[in-house]
Amino acid sequence: MNQQNVVVRALDVHKSFGALRVLEGVTVEVDRGEVLAIIGPSGSGKSTLLRCFNGLEEIEGGTVEILGTPLSLKPRKLAKQREELGMVFQRFHLFPHLTALQNIVEAPVHVKGVTRKEAERLAYELLDKVGLRDKADVYPSQLSGGQQQRVAIARALAMEPDVLLLDEPTSALDPELVGEVLQVIQQLAQEGMTMVLVTHEMAFARKVADRVLFMEGGVIVEEGVPDEMFARANSPRTRQFLQQVR
Ligand code: ADP
Ligand code: MG
């Protein structure tokens, strides 16, 4: 594992879609072992920021560094850098024609060149971690949303990323299934996994995050430790937002 302590460094990142300015100078560092929660209203640029972290979006200004190295413009090198970042989406995006186990095994075998046997050993271990070993041979359509999302988390972990980016991982779930996914995320946090979590689960953010960013209109309005931010945010906008979502 790379020993760099700053896993993601974004410096003055600017991103537009046509005339729409979505990120207007975002600077943020994610330290190894840190859980960073990003909150903010819909459309504030949270997902775009995560996508800039892993080079899914080309930026017009600023820089993004992963483990001290700027994201490469060369597709092959960029693909290698992307392996350092695991991504979990709101809508799980599992391969429907593959079982839970096969979903997890796929990338390590085809991208990393791990032997199938070794990848399966790791996949069972990860299924254990997310509490789904008994679902190894089941297809996504036979799993609940919460179970699918736990498989998606296991799949991201199978690449042994340095950081996990989670974009509203519980927003598409029925309320009764949210807890089982949050529990897995909390366990990862306790194990020291570096994570960036975009979420509307304020109580959860307060509980697991080391630091919270409040974004609005493409900028970071405020950042701080959760207890302080939630108890007494400095910015009136942050306070207003927190009152609305409560
Ligand atoms: P959030 O995740 O905070 O809700 P997003 O980063 O998804 O915000 O979106 C920020 C803004 O950028 C929104 O106005 C959204 O409509 C716009 N946007 C996001 N992706 C695209 C895209 N691929 N093309 C055009 N506009 C986009
Ligand atoms: Mg979003």
Image: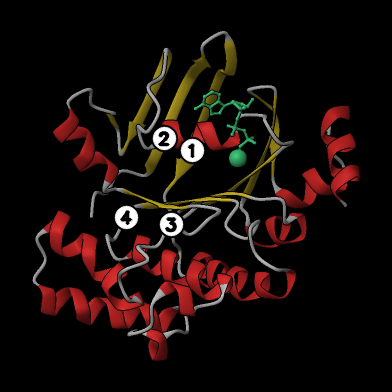
Task: Tell me whether circle 1 and circle 3 mark residues in contact (CB < 8 Å).
Answer: no
Task: Tell me whether circle 3 and circle 4 mark residues in contact (CB < 8 Å).
Answer: no
What residue did someone put label 4 on? 161
Mark 3 vs mark 4, CA separation in Å: 18 Å
State which quadrant residue 38 falls in: top right
In terms of sequence position, does the residue under pointer 1 or pointer 3 come before the other? 1
State which quadrant residue 224 falls in: top right
Q: What is the residue that sits farthest to the bottom in this orientation?
A: 134
Mark 3 vs mark 2, CA separation in Å: 19 Å
In terms of sequence position, does the residue under pointer 3 or pointer 2 come before the other? 2
- The 10 Å Cα crowd at callout 3, few under 14, some 14 to 19, many 20 or more, is few
Q: Nearer the viewer, residue 154 or 4?
A: 154
- The 10 Å Cα crowd at callout 4, few under 14, some 14 to 19, many 20 or more, is some
As helix, strand or loop, the secondary structure at mark 2 comes to helix
- Is 241 left or right of 139, judged from the image as shown? right
Q: Using the image, tell me which numbered label, if any, was put on residue 50.
A: 1
Whether the residue under disc 1 has CB within 8 Å of ligand 1: yes
Q: Position of residue 100 (x, y in %)?
A: 35, 76
- Is 210 left or right of 233, judged from the image as shown? left
Q: Nearer the viewer, mark 3 or mark 4?
A: 3
Q: Is residue 235 visible?
A: no
Q: Using the image, tell me which numbered label, if any, was put on residue 93.
A: 3
Q: Amino acid at mark 3?
A: His
Q: Using the image, tell me which numbered label, if any, was put on residue 53.
A: 2
Task: Tell me whether circle 1 and circle 2 mark residues in contact (CB < 8 Å).
Answer: yes
> Vertically, is 228 above or below 115?
above
Mark 1 vs mark 3, CA separation in Å: 17 Å
In terms of sequence position, does the residue under pointer 4 or pointer 1 come before the other? 1
